[in-house]
Image: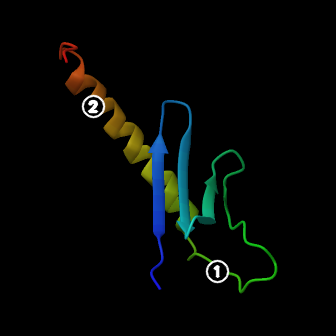
Amino acid sequence: GLHVDLSITGCSDSDGEMMYSLDGEEKWFADFINHRGVEPQPSFIDHISYVEGTYEQAVANQQVCRSNLEVTRVGMKDIPLEN
């Protein structure tokens, strides 16, 4: 059968998100408050681990996301709101 593999990355000025899931179940997410990656898998399955450096890559992605957010703000500053 087919599986749905999903990756979510998002940011704001004060918060961020990085998560991987498979078939609607979270496999890994970045806990930016505690500075670590979390693998919230139940004990009855074969544990799936991500490579070393996945959390550090998530932190780098947040820096890129915030930079892109600022570029978008500057670029859209003088665009009038129209339908």
> Which residue is painted at 58% across and 75% down in the image?
50
Q: Residues within 10 Å of mark 2 (few under 14, many from 20)?
A: few
Name the residue at the front extreme: 1
Q: Residue furthest right?
A: 43
Residue denoted by label 1: 48
- Report helix, strand or loop for mark 2: helix
Tell whether 27 sits left or right of 4: right
Instruction: Pinpoint residue 54: horizontal percent, then vertical percent.
Output: 54, 67
Question: In the rendered view, would you say 37 is above or below 23?
Answer: above
Q: How is the image coloured?
A: rainbow
For label 1, the SS is loop
- Sequence-earlier tag: 1 or 2: 1
Q: Is residue 44 above or below residue 21?
A: below
Q: Looking at the image, which is closer to me, 21 or 23?
A: 23
Q: What label sits on residue 72 in the rendered view?
A: 2
Circle 1 or circle 2, nearest the eye: 1
Query: Residue 2 placed where, x, y %?
Result: 45, 81
Q: At 24% across and 17% down in the image, what residue appears? A: 77
